[in-house]
Image (cartoon, rainbow, N blue to C red):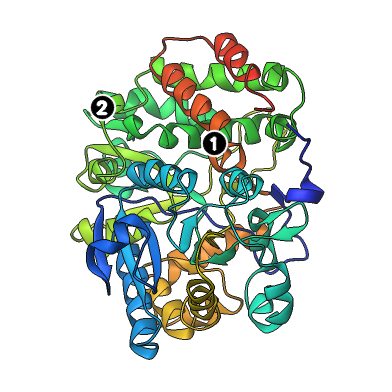
Amino acid sequence: MESRTTSRRNFLSLSMGLPLGAALAACGSSGPTQTGAGGTAAATGDAGGGATYWYLSTQPQEGVRTRTMERFNKANPNGKITGTTFQNDAFKTKIKTAIGAGQAPTLIWGWGGGGLRSYVQAGQVEDLTSWFDQNAALKDKLFPSSFGAATIEGKVYAMPCETMQPIVLYYDKRAFEKIGAQPPQSWGDIMDLVPKFNAKGIAPFSLGGQSRWTNMMWLEFLFDRQGGPEIFQAVFDGEKDAWNNPVAIDALGKMQELIKANGFIKGFSSITADSNADQALLYTGKAAMMLHGGWTYGSMSTDGGDFVSGGNLGYMNFPPIDGGKGDPGNTVGNPGQYIAISSKATAEQKEIAKKFFSTELMGDTAVKEWVGTGAVPIVKGANAQFAGSKDADFLNFVYDIAVNAKTFAQSWDQALSPTAAEVLLDNISKLFQLSISPKEFATNMNAVIGK
């Protein structure tokens, strides 16, 4: 693999000097279903001349995406977009297959990073660099850091869009009241809280472990808090045996210590995040805490009864590790969501896609709707709309994390190539099931560095 450094791919988005940091991609829950104009044609990537658009189906995010598309179609009756929604994992499989077969939708929704790089290397997506140069006002409207994961070898291949959503440590205030404790201020506090919650019949942490990427979020923070962003940066840069770093081995060991201490809900490996089952465990009082994406705030607010509106949900950045070298202000996530344009699309379809980018995708109405879901759009000045929101406290919390983070790192499975990411997720699952040791994990992952 060609070495990829921060200067070329901006894996570590340094927020100093930038208005904001980056974003974490929302993850979906159901599908596929067709929306908008064109019916089932969308499932094949062919809309009979119009453009096609595949995206994730979780609510409330799906609703914003669909309404944004519908507004565009109403304003452009002669150049419509047909949408199809998919569950997260189904989407990843379907889009890879479609692109490989030359049958991709016109608009390819995704997370940027390693996945986008693979599309670029295969010549499957349009180079948008000159288009953004010609639409400088649109580019300037978005946070500069959001372009990092859209840029491959100095060229822009995707439109940054939607929201910034760091990984957040959520907690149920009611659970802490039951054990007479405060939220953890260090890793040591986390380990001390585990037996106290278990003694009360409350799982310390909820986790949708079957989904695998939820487990990964724990390791992302442990690596960062223990040794700083440089630890994974070495993996990203393709350094030989980077996973054998003593700091990495120690972080992997800490992870298994928490698992062995019954830090997670019993049966976590059979619980799915795509069904929002992990969130339900938190807002129904069965678990005290949950490490998850910023997007889950919106779904917990929608599905959790009065859990959020009643002031029972707490949230914080991941605490430091005693003796760790990482900055506790750092966070992890993905620098926005991204939409590329298929290079196989017709000239007409490409023009429809670009018009969608420049008008409705991150237009004023879409920005307001994203704020309404309890998320922070990647548009400069979006915080001006927080004051009237019932979710103002959470929105400002997310905004402040991004503003103050010296490093806002992209999620591992999106930063790496699809091949390496799949091996990563598989080995993370095994690590959490205690079927491999930290050293075995490192050996397995070293074997795919650069692939």
Q: In the picture shown, does residue 131 fall above or below 203?
A: below
Amino acid at pointer 1: Pro
Q: Which mark is residue 381?
A: none
* Residue 299 located left or right of residue 429: left
Crowdedness near tag 1: few (<14), some (14–19) or many (≥20) residues, C-alpha within 10 Å: many
Q: Are marks 1 and 2 in contact (CB under 8 Å)?
A: no
Q: Position of residue 34 (x, y in %)?
A: 25, 63
Q: In the picture shown, does residue 113 fall above or below 126?
A: above
* Residue 211 located left or right of residue 184: left
Camera sees residue 410:
yes
Q: Which mark is residue 270?
A: 2
Tell me the element at label 1.
Answer: helix
Foreground residue among 65 and 439: 65
- Quadrant of the image containing the C terminus: top right
Foreground residue among 245 and 337: 337
* Residue 90 located left or right of residue 30: right
The structure residue drawn at horizontal position 43% and vertical position 53%, both measured from the top left corner, is: 103
Q: Position of residue 109 (x, y in %)?
A: 46, 58
Locate residue 215: give its quadrant.
Answer: top left
Tell me the element at label 2.
Answer: helix
Amino acid at pointer 2: Ser
Crowdedness near tag 2: few (<14), some (14–19) or many (≥20) residues, C-alpha within 10 Å: few
Q: Position of residue 274 (x, y in %)?
A: 30, 44
The structure residue drawn at horizontal position 68% and vertical position 32%, both measured from the top left corner, is: 232
Q: In the picture shown, does residue 334 fall above or below 363?
A: above
Q: Earlier in the sequence, mark 1 or mark 2?
A: 2
Q: How far apart are labels 1 and 2 at the CA level?
A: 24 Å
The residue wearing badge 1 is 418
- Quadrant of the image containing the N terminus: top right
Locate residue 182: give its quadrant.
Answer: top left
Foreground residue among 192 and 274: 274
